[in-house]
Image (tube, helix red, strand yellow):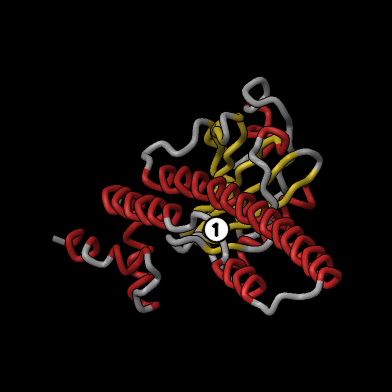
Amino acid sequence: MACERWTEKLDAYVDGELPADEARALDEHLRGCAACAAEALRKVQQKRAIQAAGQRFKPDPAFRARIQKSIAAPRPTVWNRRWVLVFVTATAAVLLIASAFLLTRQHDRRNEQQLISELVDQHVAVLASANPVDVVSTDRHTVKPWFAGKIPFTFNLPELQGSPFVLVGGRVSYLSQSPGADLIFRVRQHQISLFIFQDQGLREAGMNEPVRTALSFEVRTWRHNGLRYFVIGDASPQDLDKLSELIKAAG
């Protein structure tokens, strides 16, 4: 019965329409209920599929209207016709270049959104798992060597003494068929995932700004020395920024 009360609110939660106090309460419930977390993930994936279907590129109807208006204008002289033709051709070329640029930007954003969506799905799966990590240790000198031979790169982990963060452990993760590291950290009652992959193996994407996803997860990402880092969690933005700075300093 308790779960029924929460599942009725999942649609509003995913759409960001729940009041702040109810959203926080549902956040707490999802961290402890695998069934509700899985149902929330299903609704998010369904919403993403609908959004993707509605984001197909549509040519700007204003361009056709401008061309029709030019054709309907009073007939110019032979000399002016040449300039009109040059102008129309140049305008069409500029619009074509602008459209190509916008399409490229949209493609990059879709790639980035897909990368983030896949990693958020993995983070949610870890939250719902009874065994979230394969190597369990708070010692970075134990966790880092465990990845040797399992992934094709190495990385550094930060010294967390004196910080509010605790290293829980790690496991091997995959993104775009490329193996990488998934490190789990805890800050108070919140769990944060650090994903590290070789940048070369990922689809091209260029997001550098902080992001907040549909399930209220904060995301930070950056590139360094050929690696791509993703920090994902439902902790406060300040906590994710602080952990990101520690990781960057260690890298």
Q: Percent position (x, y) of residue 197?
A: 66, 37
Of all residues, the one furthest to the left in this rendering is 1
The residue beneath circle 1 is 187
Secondary element at image label 1: strand
In this rendering, the answer to whether 101 lies above or below 228 is below
Residue depicted at x 54% and y 44%: 168
Q: Residue at x 61, y 35 (%)?
A: 181
User: Around disc 1, counting alpha carbons within 10 Å, would you say few (fewer than 14), some (14 to 19), or many (20 or more)?
Assistant: some
Residue 87 x/y as whole percent: 79, 67
**In the picture shown, does residue 141 fall above or below 189?**
above
Q: Residue at x 76, y 60 (%)?
A: 89
Q: Amino acid at mark 1?
A: Val
Q: Quadrant of residue 51?
A: bottom left
Q: Look at 52% across and 35% down and name the residue there.
A: 136
Q: How many marks?
A: 1
Q: Observer-nearest residue: 34 or 73?
A: 73
Q: Quadrant of the C terminus?
A: top right
Residue 185 visible in the shown view: no
Q: Is residue 174 at least partly visible in the picture?
A: yes
Quadrant of the image containing the N terminus: bottom left
Q: Position of residue 212 (x, y in %)?
A: 53, 64
Hey, which residue is sitting farthest right in the picture? 79
User: Which residue is farthest top?
Assistant: 149
Residue 234 is left or right of residue 102, and the answer is: left
* Location of residue 165 in the rendering, given as x and y in whole percent from the top left corner: 60, 55
- Closest to the observer: 100 or 142? 100
